[in-house]
Image (spheres, grey):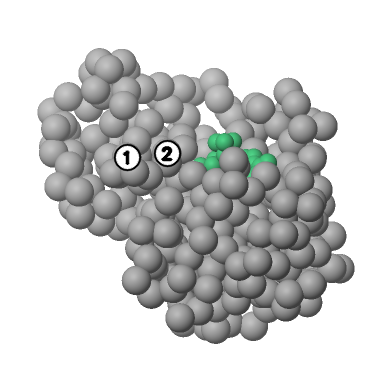
């Protein structure tokens, strides 16, 4: 069995990944207490001892606000931690997957969908950390895939981590009886987390390099929330549950969508975001 080491093992992505592939790969899903990526000696020892075929480096501080408020700590985890992992991978000839983000484009003003050829101009610490780490890792390790994910969504699952996402955020507001105020002036790719996870055996077969990963989406954030409310059976309460935030991004539409044609050319297809939302709601039989 091939071996995979996951960093950030308690997180939203890794917990689901480890469950999905527990019988396919030998997986070491390392949470922060087992493997703190800022601890270079611990990283070296853990990777040397497990000797994985692949290291999926997902550990990060991924909250934009947290990173802006704690830039030194964010750098230490998001950049120095990634370097530690890449150097250790090089020592034992493990292939590395670095999970980057659409947020590298959050300061670009032309609007997406961005291809891998567009130069990113991040304007948050998190986006800057991811972009800097991408560049430094490429210098350390030739056997590297950089995967820039769109915004992932999913719902709580048994023994799995959660992170903020559009589907669970909308459902939580409904359950709390809170009206969601959502901008119609924002466009992002929104990808069902299990769709990304399911593609990994194929990802291990594509050439090393940088790839934009996830769903394309022509709907605004407001339109997606409308769809969620309809799909869970609450269309009759739409006006009570959802309102438009017309102030946010009113002077400049925010569009950080990724063009995923490059990865598609290697046979990796993703649903449109609307179809991904419908699929998730159907799979979990979500009706309110
Ligand atoms: N979810 C998305 O929509 C999305 C989109 C684009 C890119 N990404 C990237 O995908 C990766 C996984 O995202 P996710 O949603 O699964 O995030 P997540 O749930 O926040 O998971 C990240 C994990 O990293 C851990 N971590 C933090 N500091 C660490 C350290 N020093 N050493 C080891 N682990 C540490 C966190 O543990 P603590 O909770 O203990 O801090 C957390 O369990 C991240 O790199 C993120 O930047 C995610």
Q: Are marks 1 and 2 in contact (CB under 8 Å)?
A: yes
**Picture layout, residue 34 above or below residue 27:** above
Residue placed at 46% from the left, 22% from the top? 245
Give the number of the disc on residue 93: none
Is 98 left, or right, of 230 in this rendering?
right
In what quadrant of the picture does the N terminus appear? bottom left
Residue 235 can be seen in this image: yes
* First-in-chain label (1 vs 2): 1
Instruction: Identify the residue at image location x=42%, y=39%.
Output: 162
Quadrant in the picture for the C terminus: top left
Give 35 or 261, whichever is nearer the viewer.
Answer: 35
Label 1: how many residues lie within 10 Å, few (<14), some (14-19) or many (20+)?
A: few
In-front residue for pair 17/147: 17
Mark 1: is the Cβ under 8 angstroms from ligand 1?
no
Residue at left offset 55%, top offset 83%: 205
Q: Secondary structure at mark 2?
A: loop
Query: Residue sitting at 67 percent across and 44 percent down?
Result: 36
Identify residue for label 2. Answer: 162
Q: Quadrant of ligand 1?
A: top right
Q: Quadrant of residue 261?
A: bottom right
Q: Does the beta carbon at disc 2 come under 8 Å from ligand 1?
A: yes
Residue receiving disc 1: 156
**Left or right: 165, with 252 as reference point:** left
Label 1, label 2: how many angstroms apart (C-alpha)?
A: 6 Å
Q: Describe residue 279's horizontal placement relative to residue 189 as left or right.
A: left
Residue 84: x percent and y percent? 78, 55
């Amino acid at each position: 069995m091939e071996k995979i080491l996951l960093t950030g093992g308690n997180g939203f992505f890794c917990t689901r990944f480890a469950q999905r592939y527990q019988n396919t790969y030998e997986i070491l899903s390392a949470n922060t207490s087992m493997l703190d990526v800022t601890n270079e000696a611990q990283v070296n020892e853990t990777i040397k001892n497990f000797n994985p075929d692949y290291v999926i480096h997902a550990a990060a501080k991924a909250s934009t606000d947290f990173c802006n408020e704690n830039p030194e700590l964010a750098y230490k985890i998001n950049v120095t931690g990634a370097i530690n992992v890449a150097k250790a991978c090089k020592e034992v000839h493990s292939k590395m997957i670095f999970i980057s983000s659409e947020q590298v484009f959050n300061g670009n003003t032309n609007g997406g969908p961005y291809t891998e050829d567009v130069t990113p101009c991040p304007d948050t610490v998190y986006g800057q950390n991811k972009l800097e780490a991408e560049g430094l890792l490429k210098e350390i390790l030739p056997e590297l895939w950089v995967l820039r994910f769109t915004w992932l969504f999913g719902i709580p699952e048994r023994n799995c981590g959660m992170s903020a996402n559009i589907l669970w955020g909308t459902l939580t507001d409904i359950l709390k009886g809170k009206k969601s105020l959502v901008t119609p002036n924002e466009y992002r790719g929104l990808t069902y987390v299990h769709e990304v996870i399911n593609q990994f055996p194929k990802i291990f077969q594509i050439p090393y390099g940088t790839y934009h990963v996830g769903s394309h989406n022509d709907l605004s954030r407001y339109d997606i929330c409308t769809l969620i409310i309809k799909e869970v059976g609450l269309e009759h309460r739409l006006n009570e549950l959802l309102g438009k935030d017309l102030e946010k991004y009113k002077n400049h539409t925010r569009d950080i969508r990724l063009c995923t044609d490059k990865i598609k050319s290697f046979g990796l297809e993703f649903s449109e975001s609307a179809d991904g939302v419908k699929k998730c709601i159907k799979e979990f039989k979500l009706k309110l």
